[in-house]
Image (cartoon, rainbow, N blue to C red):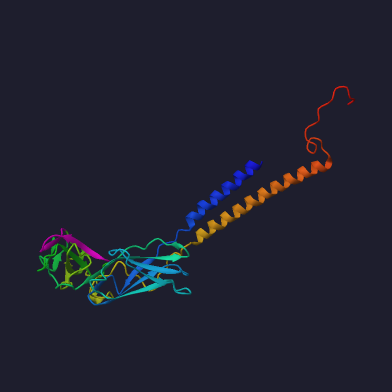
Amino acid sequence: MGSFLLTLLSFGLCLSLGITAQIVTLSKPILWAKPRSMVAWGTDVILWCQGPPGVDMYRLERLDSPNDYKDQPGLPGTEARARFPLGSALASVAGRYRCSYRNGSRWSQPSNQLELIVTGLYDKPSFSILPGTEVSSGENVTFSCSSKFGFNMFTIAKEGRAGIWRTQEGLSPVYFSIPTVTASHNGTYQCYGFDSHFPHLWTAPSEPLELRVKGIPQPPSPRESNTPTGAPTSPHIFPDKVDIPIGLTSQDYTVSNLVRLVLAGLTVAALGVLLAEAWRAKFHMLSGSPSQAQGPTAPQVKGLPL
C-alpha cells in the first residue's frame, strides 16, 4: 500500500510540473511604428510595444546591431504598452526591430519583426506605365522604374495597400509586368530604388501614377477616400488600442487550478488511507488479536500442556 501511495503522489507531482512548465510561457507582444514603418527622412518615429497589464519591463532590440537594445519599465494600471522614441528618421535608425517583456524572472516570446524603412536618401526614380495609364481590362501592362544611381533593387508600392506590392532585382531600368489587368489593379502606384546591401534605405518615391482599367466600374480613387496619400499603409501599423491575450490566459489559469485540485485530492486520499491503516493497526493491538498485536505464534515446547 505504501509503494502504491508513493507512486500515486509521484504521478501527481510529475503531472503538475509538466502542465506548469507549459503555462509559464508568456504570449508575445505586438510591435508597431508611428506614424508608420516606412517614413521619409527626418520624420519623428516612435515604436510602441504592447503586452498584457502588469508587465515589469519592456525591451526593444535592434536586430541589425548586436547588443543594441533599450529597456522601459511597464506602466502602472491598465496601460499595457511601452513607448520607444527613436527621434528623427535617419540612416542610423533604419533596420529590423523586435520587442519582448519581462514578468518577474520570465521573458515573453519576442514580437514579430518590424522593418523600419527610411525613404528620401536619394533622388526619386523615373516611373512610367506602358502602354499607358488607361488600359482595357485583360490587356498587358508594364511598369518601368529607373534611377541614375546604380541600385540593384526596385519596389512598386500601391496606395491604400498593406505593404509593398512588388519588389524585383535587376539593374535600371527594371520592368514589372502584369499579363492581364483586372479591376484589382486599379489604383495609384509609386516606385522606389535601393541597394540590396542596405535594404532599409530607399530613394524618395517617384511621381505617383494612377492606373485606370476601362470597361469596369471605377472605384473611388485613394485620393478621394479617407486613405492618406503618400507611402503605402504599413503592415506594422496598428490602431491606438490593441487588444492582445494576456501573458497567462484564462484557460491556463483553469488548467492550473484543476491541477491544484487534483493534487489536493490525491494528497487527501493518501492521508486518509494512511490514517485508516494506522487506526486499524491500533484497533487490533487494543483488542489483543494475536495475529496482529502479538506477532507470530510462539513455538510449542514438547511435553508441556497446551
Residue 149 seen in render? yes
> Residue 244: x percent and y percent?
42, 66
> Viewed as shown, does residue 201 lie left or right of 284?
left
Q: Compared to 279, does 304 lie above or below?
A: above
> Viewed as shown, does residue 98 lie left or right of 213?
right
> Residue 214: x percent and y percent?
16, 67
Question: In this orientation, which residue lies closer to the viewer: 109 or 193?
Answer: 109
What kind of secondary structure does the magenta stretch mostly adopt? Answer: strand
Q: Compared to 96, does 45 lie above or below?
A: below
Residue 171, magenta (yes or no): yes
Residue 216 seen in render? no
| Quarter of the figure with residue 8 | top right
Query: Residues in magenta?
Result: 162-179
Badge count: 0
- Which residue is located at x 37 percent, y 62 percent? 110
Q: Assign the C terminus to one quadrant of the image.
A: top right
Q: Compared to 19, does 94 lie above or below?
A: below
| Quarter of the figure with residue 298 | top right
> Residue 224: x percent and y percent?
24, 76
Question: In this orientation, which residue lies closer to the viewer: 268 or 132?
Answer: 268
Residue 100, magenta (yes or no): no
